[in-house]
Structure formats: structure tokens, C-alpha cells
Image (spheres, rainbow, N blue to C red):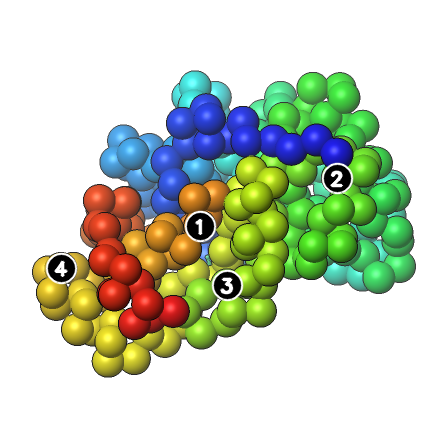
């Protein structure tokens, strides 16, 4: 089984940008260009976000992508969409929407209950072999599925639901750290840290969202959160969370 640590070795900033509310407006295109100048190097999207507009906006605003910037997208979300002909069509649509010759990271968005994950991942591997996908990821999976996936193609990233309130995937986070696979928590800010979160934020003169991100970053060296925002102010606050070091006591108060 191969492991891939290439994304972080390549210097990707460990706080990315989620784009599941991005619509294709001139303002949002300008927002994306501003995000890159602020230091974002990792943008998360999916074929289905905002009916395809998220990918189109990213393509229109940022293509050709500057060196070192990764756009991650996903396909195969709904039952039946892991079938080879459907997944291939979605990959082609993503390449077109992003105006890219190669997708930096492509996730199987969900394991299709109607298609063996090996079959879906073989399709993605085929695009990787052609140089149209650089790295491969998988979303909302347990360790057993990740190990099956790694028999088919090297897995660079796992994207699962995880935040202060949603802790189902602790074992997956540990596995990813051991195996040097990036763990990308989705809905990173939607948890509830209670009064402790507010107290720690005050002590650091930071916002609760920043402390939440600092807590995620301390949880695992291969954690890379993708907070979703359309606000330039929030985007900068999220990147500034990279500078916050929580003490062990603060970390444990939220753990
Ligand atoms: N793999 C999957 O199945 C899956 C599922 C869901 C989501 N995702 C991905 O995960 C990303 C993150 O999820 P999400 O955006 O739904 O949830 P989230 O990142 O947990 O929270 C986003 C919310 O937090 C606010 N926010 C962001 N930064 C903030 C800050 N510094 N201070 C205060 N509020 C802040 C945003 O509003 P503002 O715009 O006002 O900042 C928005 O209301 C998505 O964009 C998507 O790319 C993946």
C-alpha cells in the first residue's frame, strides 16, 4: 500500500477554503483572487456545489492556477454516480468547469452503495494514469474502506465530517496521521465549544472560530481544515489561526 504526503510536502497551507456556497458573480471571482493573495493555497469544491457554479467560478477566476495552489474537487455523490460512465462524465465536467488540464486532488465524494469502491476508484486511477488527476482522495469513509481504496490507488487525502461536536472519526484521524495521509475535516466550524471555547478565545484575543481551527490543527499533524467563507475578513482570520498555539490544558479543555 502506498502513502502520499506530497500535498503537505509541497507546502500547501494547512488552512484551506471551502466553497459550497460560491455562486458565479464578479464579486465572488474577485473574492477568490483575493483569497490567493491572502495566502490560501488549497481550495475545496465539488461537482455538485451550487449546481456546478462553484467549480465554474473557480475556473473563471483562477485558471491557470499559480504554481503551488491546489483545487480539490469531488464527484460521485449520489447513489449510482460511482458507476464508471457517470463518474467519468463528472470528471470531464470538472476538468472543463475548472478550466484545468489536471485536477490537483480528486475525491470520490461518497462510496456508491450500488458500485464497489474498487470499481469507482479504478476510474479515478485511470485519469491519474493519463495525467488528468494528480492526487486522489475519498470522503466519508472508515479505515477499512481507506485500506481497500489504497489497494487500487495511492490515497493522499480523506475528507470526513469532524469538528468540536462531531467526533465519530477519531480512529480515522489517527490512522491518517500514522499513514501520512491528509485528513480534511468538513464542517470544521459547525461544532459547539461551549463556555470553554469563549474563555480560551478571550485569553488569546482571538475569535472562537480561530480557536476551533487551532484546536483542529493541534489534534493531528496531518489535519487540514477547509472552513467555508465568503467573507474576506473571516478568510484572513482563518489563516491567522495558523499562528495560534494552544497549551495542552487549553487543548484538553476542548477535547
Ligand atoms: N465531503 C463532504 O461531503 C462535504 C460536506 C459538506 C461540506 N464540505 C466542504 O467543507 C467545507 C466547509 O463546510 P461549511 O462551509 O459548510 O461549514 P463550516 O466551514 O464549518 O462553516 C461555515 C460557516 O462558518 C462561517 N465562518 C467561516 N469563517 C468564519 C470566521 N472566521 N468567523 C465566523 N464565522 C465564520 C461562514 O460564514 P461567512 O461566509 O460569513 O464567513 C459559514 O456560515 C465546505 O465549504 C465544503 O467545501 C464537504
Q: Which residue is mark 2?
A: 150
Q: Nearer the viewer, residue 30 or 116?
A: 116
Q: Are marks 3 and 1 in contact (CB under 8 Å)?
A: no
Q: Which mark is residue 220?
A: 1
In which quadrant will I find the C terminus?
A: bottom left
- SS at badge 4: loop
Instruction: Using the numbered discs, state the Cα–Cα distance from disc 4 to disc 2 in whole angstroms.
Output: 41 Å
Q: Residues within 10 Å of mark 2 (few under 14, many from 20)?
A: some
- Sequence order check, earlier mark of 3 and 2: 2
**Rendered view: 153 above or below 144:** above
Q: Is residue 10 left or right of residue 87?
A: left
Q: Residues within 10 Å of mark 3 (few under 14, many from 20)?
A: many
* Residue at image coords 88%, 51%: 116
Q: Nearer the viewer, residue 157 or 245?
A: 245
Q: Which mark is residue 6?
A: none
- Sequence order check, earlier mark of 4 and 1: 4
* Residue at image coords 19%, 68%: 200
- Sequence order check, earlier mark of 4 and 2: 2
**Rendered view: 220 above or below 248:** above
Assess mark 3: CB under 8 A from ligand 1? Answer: no
- Sequence order check, earlier mark of 4 and 3: 3
> Percent from the top left, x then y, of residue 192?
36, 76
**Rendered view: 131 above or below 18:** above
- Sequence order check, earlier mark of 3 and 1: 3
- Sequence order check, earlier mark of 2 and 1: 2
Q: Which residue is mark 4?
A: 204
> Percent from the top left, x then y, of residue 254?
33, 70
Q: Is residue 16 left or right of residue 236?
A: right
Question: Which of the 4 image quadrants contains residue 253?
Answer: bottom left
Amino acid at each position: 500500500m502506498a502513502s502520499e504526503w506530497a500535498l503537505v510536502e509541497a507546502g500547501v497551507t494547512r488552512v484551506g477554503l471551502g466553497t459550497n456556497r460560491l455562486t458565479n458573480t464578479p464579486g465572488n471571482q474577485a473574492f477568490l483572487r483575493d483569497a490567493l493573495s491572502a495566502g490560501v493555497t488549497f481550495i475545496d469544491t465539488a461537482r455538485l456545489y451550487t449546481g456546478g457554479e462553484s467549480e465554474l467560478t473557480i475556473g473563471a477566476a483562477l485558471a491557470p492556477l499559480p504554481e503551488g495552489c491546489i483545487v480539490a474537487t469531488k464527484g460521485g455523490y449520489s447513489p449510482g454516480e460511482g458507476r464508471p460512465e457517470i463518474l467519468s462524465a463528472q470528471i470531464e465536467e470538472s476538468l472543463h468547469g475548472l478550466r484545468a488540464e489536471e485536477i490537483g486532488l480528486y475525491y470520490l465524494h461518497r462510496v456508491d452503495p450500488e458500485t464497489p469502491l474498487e470499481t469507482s476508484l479504478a476510474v479515478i486511477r485511470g485519469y491519474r494514469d493519463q495525467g488528468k488527476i494528480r492526487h486522489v482522495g475519498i470522503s466519508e469513509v472508515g479505515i477499512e474502506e481507506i485500506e481497500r481504496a489504497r489497494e487500487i490507488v495511492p490515497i493522499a487525502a480523506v475528507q470526513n465530517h469532524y469538528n468540536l461536536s462531531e467526533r465519530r472519526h477519531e480512529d480515522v484521524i489517527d490512522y491518517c496521521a500514522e499513514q501520512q495521509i491528509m485528513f480534511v475535516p468538513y464542517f470544521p466550524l459547525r461544532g459547539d465549544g461551549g463556555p470553554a471555547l469563549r474563555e480560551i478565545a478571550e485569553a488569546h484575543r482571538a475569535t472562537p472560530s480561530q480557536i476551533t481551527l487551532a484546536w483542529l490543527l493541534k489534534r493531528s499533524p496531518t489535519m487540514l481544515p477547509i472552513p467555508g467563507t465568503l467573507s474576506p475578513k473571516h478568510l484572513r482570520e482563518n489563516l491567522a489561526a495558523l499562528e495560534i498555539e494552544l497549551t495542552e490544558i487549553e487543548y484538553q479543555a476542548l477535547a
